[in-house]
Image (spheres, rainbow, N blue to C red):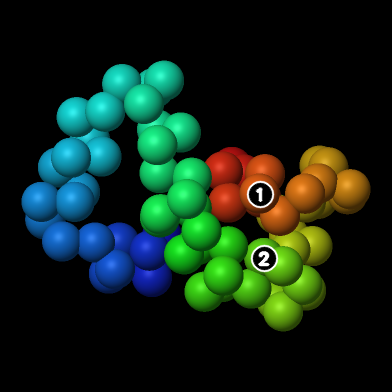
Amino acid sequence: MDIILSWLSEEDKESIRAMQEGEIIRLHFTLGLRIRNQLGLWGKNPDLVAALSRDAPFAHPDDLYGAD
């Protein structure tokens, strides 16, 4: 989380905090894409992918950045 938070301005953080649950999907092609690409969820970071997909071993990378 520290890495992701470091990418965001205070204005970005406040905007995200103010979003309703159904609005979060708007971040899929912006912040979500950056998370997937920068953190290697498309196979460039197998240890992170394995940790995030522990409960869903065949999860798609688009699903991993929202993992608990």
Seen at 38% across and 70% down, the residue is 3
Left of 40 or right of it: where is 2?
A: left
Q: What is the quadrant of residue 45 in the picture? A: bottom right
Q: How many marks?
A: 2
Point 58% across, 62% down: residue: 36
Residue 18 versus residue 64 in the image, above or below: above
Name above or below for residue 27 compared with residue 8: above
Q: Residue at x 30, y 61 (%)?
A: 5
Q: Is residue 51 above or below residue 20?
A: below
Question: Residue 39: x and y, percent?
Answer: 56, 71
Extreme residue in the bottom direction: 44
Q: Which mark is residue 41?
A: 2
Q: Is residue 33 visible?
A: yes
- Is residue 47 at least partly visible in the picture? no
**Amino acid beneath label 2:** Leu
Graded by Cα atoms within 10 Å as few (under 14), some (14 to 19) or many (20 or more), the crowding at tag 2 reads many
Q: Depth check: give the residue in front, 27 or 41.
A: 27
Which quadrant of the figure contains the N terminus? bottom left
| Quarter of the image with the C terminus in it | top right
Give the residue pinned by disc 1: 62
Query: Residue 62 vs residue 31: left or right?
Result: right
Helix, strand or loop under label 2: loop
User: Extreme front residue here?
Assistant: 29
Image check: 14 left or right of 32? left
- Residue under the image location 51 percent in, 58 percent down: 33
Q: Pointer 1: residues within 10 angstroms few (<14), some, or many (20+)? A: some
Residue type beneath disc 1: Asp
Q: Position of residue 18 (x, y in %)?
A: 19, 29
Say whether marks 2 and 1 touch (CB < 8 Å). no
